[in-house]
Image: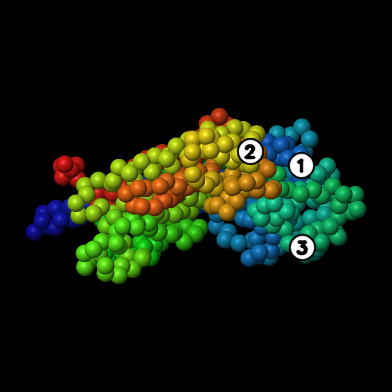
């Protein structure tokens, strides 16, 4: 009996381990916190000095109150902090001829491992006066504060905090206050090697979940709705101990001829959101992990009864989308602005007679992150401000676009919407986990069943 129980338990353990092995690993909450803390220290020590020099500032002041956090200050908070505390004041100073920065918390306690406390309320009860003293002692040439007309990410200081800051500084120091936009955007957009390793891993996880949802494991044609699939994704994300930064969307396109059959069945009313054989499905999906975000759009097709593979005419439409991706990424040149990349891309599109839209954006601590905007879905001309921002190396992007292809077999134009995460290393664009080159079939047909 004991032997049988032992064998049964062993079998259950092996099955459990086999199931775990099927999925890329997601760290425990404690391990994730350790990684976040380690990366924050790494970024402050090795990345921030260079970014401050590039922006031409030697001091950065970040101020936020609890539950009204500056988007940037959130990226400096410890992994175990979910919000600022009371009024959180952080000061980053890079002295002349120094290759390191001093990270200061005008607080009663250290803020994480990096920011050391510099305020004793028993000696100076007024936190603003303590901040003023920290600034005056270091006598910076330029004091960066997060206000910006262009980027919401870099516009985080509240009006009241800004006015209080100025009222507590001397007239001379007030004249040294500058916008922290360039520094804030640089901090948010620049990726380290360890972050890029995580991005590849994250994209693998995202692609796996996408493929799982767009399969016969989730979708029963004629029964399952697009909303059913959307909420399956939400549940799956939670099951995998992940988060998302937006509600997934699943939509479909179908042939004009699919509902015009002379048969009685063809004339029956079909609800638009019920997935049917012959539908082309599109998903927009993103996950959040280790403070980074993905953004992915892919396609799947529901096979009809007499089909063993996705129709060639739809696969050909995807190829047009792939070609458009190649055109766009070939225009990524360090120093070019988002508007310039868009203009050059559209010029090649015109030469090749490709119809479509470009609306790519940076990825990072935010899904729609700061950096160069490369077109918008509702604007294929210049984007003032964010479109004028230049492309820097070591940055990440959602290569997002759509190609419009006339499909004779369907009697209409079909839009092939694609989005893949990628990294620009200064010379070339590298997809995190490859890109979709074939439309997924639902169900996945086993090779031995193919004709």
Callout 2: helix, strand or loop?
helix
C-alpha span from label 1 to label 2 = 27 Å
Q: What residue occupies the far left of the structure in this picture?
A: 1
| Residue at 22% over, 52% down | 15
Q: Position of residue 324 (x, y in %)?
A: 47, 39
Total marks placed: 3
The image quadrant that residue 125 belongs to is: bottom right
Q: Which residue is mark 2?
A: 340
Q: Position of residue 20 (x, y in %)?
A: 30, 50
| Residue 44 appears anywhere in the view | no
The numbered mark, 3 or 2, whose residue comes first in the sequence reads 3
Percent x, y of residue 172: 90, 49
Q: Residue at x 86, y 60 (%)?
A: 167
Report the mark closest to the observer, 1 or 3: 3
- Residue 130, labelled with which disc? none
Q: CA distance from mark 3 to mark 2?
A: 34 Å
SS for dot 1: loop
Q: Position of residue 53 (x, y in %)?
A: 73, 36
Between residue 155 and residue 75, name the one nearer to us: 155
At a point 19% along the width and 51% down the height, the residue shown is: 306
**Residue located farthest toward the bottom when viewing the structure as drawn:** 269
Of the image marks 1 and 2, the number of the one nearer the N terminus: 1
Q: Which mark is residue 159?
A: 3
Give the side of residue 403 with respect to residue 106, left or right: left
Residue in front for this viewpoint, 388 or 65? 388
Left or right of 423: which side holds 101? right
Q: Mark 1 vs mark 2: give the one in front.
A: 2
Query: Few, some or many C-alpha atoms within 10 Å of disc 1 (few <14, some 14-19, many ≥20)?
Result: many
Nearest to N terminus: mark 1 or mark 3: 1
- Residue pointed to by mark 1: 57
């Amino acid at each position: 009996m004991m032997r049988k129980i032992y064998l049964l338990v062993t079998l259950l353990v092996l099955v459990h381990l086999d199931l775990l092995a099927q999925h890329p690993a997601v760290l425990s909450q404690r391990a994730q916190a350790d990684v976040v803390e380690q990366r924050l220290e790494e970024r402050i020590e090795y990345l921030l000095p260079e970014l401050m020099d590039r922006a031409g500032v030697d001091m950065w002041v970040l101020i936020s109150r609890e539950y009204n956090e500056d988007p940037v200050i959130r990226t400096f908070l410890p992994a175990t902090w979910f919000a600022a505390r009371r009024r959180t004041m952080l000061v980053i100073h890079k002295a002349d001829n120094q290759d390191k920065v001093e990270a200061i918390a005008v607080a009663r306690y250290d803020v994480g491992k990096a920011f050391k406390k510099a305020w004793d309320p028993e000696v100076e009860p007024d936190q603003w006066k303590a901040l003023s003293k920290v600034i005056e002692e270091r006598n910076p040439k330029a004091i960066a504060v997060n206000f910006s007309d262009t980027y919401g990410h870099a516009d985080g200081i509240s009006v009241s905090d800004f006015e209080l800051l100025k009222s507590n500084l001397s007239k001379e120091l007030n004249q040294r206050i500058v916008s922290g936009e360039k520094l804030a955007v640089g901090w948010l957009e620049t990726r380290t090697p360890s972050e890029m390793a995580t991005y590849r891993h994250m994209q693998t996880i995202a692609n796996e979940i996408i493929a799982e949802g767009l399969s016969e494991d989730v979708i029963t044609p004629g029964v399952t709705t697009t909303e059913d699939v959307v909420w399956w994704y939400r549940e799956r994300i939670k099951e995998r101990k992940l988060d998302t930064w937006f509600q997934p969307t699943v939509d479909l396109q179908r042939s004009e001829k699919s509902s015009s059959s002379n048969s009685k069945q063809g004339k029956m009313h079909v609800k638009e959101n019920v997935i049917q054989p012959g539908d082309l499905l599109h998903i927009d999906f993103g996950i959040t992990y280790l403070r980074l975000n993905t953004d992915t759009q892919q396609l799947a097709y529901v096979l009809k009864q007499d089909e063993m593979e996705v129709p060639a005419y739809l696969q050909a439409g995807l190829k047009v989308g792939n070609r458009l991706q190649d055109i766009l990424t070939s225009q990524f040149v360090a120093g070019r602005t988002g508007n310039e990349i868009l203009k050059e891309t559209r010029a090649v599109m015109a030469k090749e007679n490709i119809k479509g839209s470009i609306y790519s954006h940076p990825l990072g601590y935010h899904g729609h992150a700061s950096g160069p905007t490369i077109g918008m879905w509702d604007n294929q001309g210049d984007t003032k401000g964010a479109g004028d921002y230049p492309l820097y190396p070591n940055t990440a992007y959602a290569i997002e676009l759509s190609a419009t292809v006339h499909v004779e077999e369907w009697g209409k134009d079909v839009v092939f919407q694609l989005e893949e995460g990628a990294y620009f290393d200064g010379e070339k664009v590298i997809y995190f986990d490859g890109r979709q080159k074939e439309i997924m079939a639902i169900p996945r047909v086993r090779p031995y069943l193919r004709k």
